[in-house]
Structures are given as C-alpha cells and as structure tokens.
Image (cartoon, helix red, strand yellow):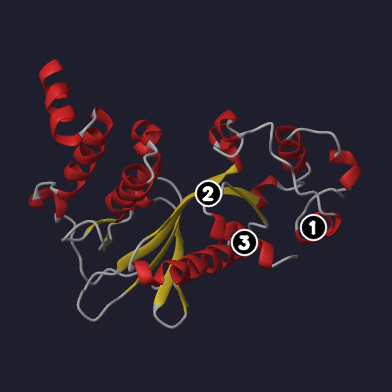
C-alpha cells in the first residue's frame, strides 16, 4: 500500500486524484462481455417527454434496473444508464470541482430515482445524456443532503420575502406561512419549519447532484433545459415542492429572475 501511495503521488500528484481516475477507469474499461450482455439497441422509453423538439426527459424510478445504454462525453463507448450517471458524477463533481468527499458515496448515484435529459444524434444509435439529477423521497429524509450539517452556515441570511412565502403556501399543500414565524431563527430552524409545514409529504422531494454535460458552448442552454425539464417532470409526478442545493450562481439568478 505504501508503494501504491508513492506511485499515486508521483503520477497524479495526490492519492485522491489517483482514486478519482481509478473509479472512472473501472467504469469505462469494464470487460466488453459484461458491458454488452443486455445490449438492445432498439430498447427505448416511449413514455419520455420531448422538450425543444430533440431533447427527451423523464424520471426513471430505479436506474439500477434500467437496461438502456447511453453515450457520455467521458467514454468512447456507451454505458448502462447507472454506470453512465456515476461516470458523469465523478467527472463533473469530483474531478472538475474536487469534491473528493463523494468518493465514499458513489453508490448513491448508481441506484434510485433519477431525472435524465438526453438527446438522439444522427451519428449515434444510442442517446447521449445531457443532464441527470438524483431524486429522494421524504421516506428517506434522514439521508437528504439538504438537511445535513455540512450544508449549513450560521452566516447565511434567509430570503423571507412575504410574497414568496404566500405563493409557496398557495402552490403547495402547506399550512399557512407567515414571515413573523421565521424571524430570528437560524437557517436550519427555518428549513425544518418549512418541511414540517408540508401537509402531504408525498408531494415533496429532494433533487440533488444535478449535472450538465455536452458542448461547453451550450452549457447555459442545457442548464436551462435541465431545470425546465426537471420542474415539469416532478410536477407531473405529483411533487409540488422540491428541496435542493444550488452551487452554480447562474442557477440562483435563473430562479430569482422568475420571481414568483
């Protein structure tokens, strides 16, 4: 192990970068006999919705049981949906943003309900994934990152716009909300109060690990399509309120521009 660590530092600069590349390598270079044992190029989901003419989006109840294959920009050959999403998560969150904490939680991205946005191109018989996001129900709220202490900060200033609280109450099955009930409370207390104000917990979920892939010149456009598709897919599935963690300033500005 000492020898491996020394080689990792020599070649990659640190052990974490080596681990990241190794996880990507394992996904990309699976034995072809295993990779294509369930290959069916004709298998498509007829229930997917189409956005902007050529982009498809849908909610997959459990990606670990989905047998379709998808292209990603990080592999020359298509991968099973579950492997494709894990690979994209590693490449974007861990390799690009250096969120090495996720190395211990890769299994979260390999199963469960996910939103996917993808497109078919003339050159490929397999669709290419443009975006994905993990959807978690309230039944496993204890696993939500939204309420994890890691994503809390005492210096945050909550945006308690009265009109926003009113529209939130009207748009969802929540008990009436008033700005006064949140004054002088921490962000953690406010978020928990909001959650427990939801009368029907089946109408709430958490959406995290939103990834955007594809051409860099279309990044903002794909981000817009992903957010629009995600909102429509969740609304159609009966979710009225979504808890999420936003890292990209452009996404915050996008939602602020929509106002109510």
Q: Are marks 3 and 2 in contact (CB under 8 Å)?
A: no
Is there any visible trace of residue 131 in the rendered image? yes
Residue with the mark numbered 3? 253
The residue lying toward the viewer, choosing from 214 and 199, is: 214
> Residue at (14%, 56%) from the top-left corner?
36
**Residue at 29% across / 69% down in the picture?**
127
Vertical arrangement, residue 55 with respect to residue 11, above or below? below
**Of the pair 223 and 235, the residue shown nearer to us:** 223
Q: CA distance from mark 1 to mark 3?
A: 15 Å
Dot 1, crowdedness within 10 Å: few (<14), some or many (≥20)?
A: some
Q: Secondary structure at mark 2?
A: loop
Note whether 209 is above or below 237 in the view shown.
above
In the visual, does 215 lie left or right of 160?
Answer: left
Give coordinates of residue 11: x percent, y percent.
13, 34
Q: Position of residue 113 (x, y in %)?
A: 46, 50
Q: Please rate how many residues cluster around mark 3, counting C-alpha atoms within 10 Å: few if below 14, some from 14 to 19, many from 20.
A: few
Please tell me whether residue 54 is drawn above or below residue 45 in the rendered image: below
Q: Name the quadrant of the C terminus.
A: bottom right
Q: Nearer the viewer, mark 1 or mark 3?
A: 3
Where is mark 1, residue-wise?
164
- Cα distance between the residues tagged 1 and 2: 21 Å
Q: Secondary structure at mark 1?
A: helix
Q: Which residue is mark 2?
A: 247
């Amino acid at each position: 192990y000492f020898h491996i660590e020394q080689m990792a530092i020599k070649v990659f600069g640190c052990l974490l970068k080596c681990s990241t590349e190794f996880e990507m390598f394992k996904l990309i270079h699976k034995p072809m006999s295993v990779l294509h044992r369930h290959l069916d190029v004709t298998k498509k989901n007829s229930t997917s919705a189409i956005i902007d003419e050529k982009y498809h989006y849908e909610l997959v109840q459990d990606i670990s049981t989905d047998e379709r294959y998808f292209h990603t920009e990080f592999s020359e050959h298509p991968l099973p949906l579950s492997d494709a999403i894990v690979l994209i998560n590693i490449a974007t969150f861990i390799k690009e943003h250096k969120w090495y904490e996720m190395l211990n939680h890769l299994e979260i991205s390999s199963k469960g309900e996910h939103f996917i946005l993808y497109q078919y191109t003339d050159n490929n018989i397999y669709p290419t994934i443009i975006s994905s996001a993990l959807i978690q129900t309230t039944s496993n709220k204890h696993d939500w990152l939204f309420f994890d202490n890691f994503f809390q900060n005492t210096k945050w200033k909550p945006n308690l716009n009265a009109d926003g609280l009113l529209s939130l109450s009207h748009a969802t099955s929540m008990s009436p909300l008033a700005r006064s009930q949140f004054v002088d409370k921490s962000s953690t207390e406010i978020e928990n109060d909001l959650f427990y104000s939801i009368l029907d917990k089946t109408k709430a979920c958490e959406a995290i690990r939103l990834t955007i892939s594809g051409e860099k010149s279309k990044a903002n456009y794909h981000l817009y399509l992903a957010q629009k598709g995600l909102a429509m897919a969740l609304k159609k599935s009966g979710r009225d309120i979504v808890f999420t963690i936003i890292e990209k300033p452009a996404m915050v500005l996008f939602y602020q521009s929509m106002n109510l």
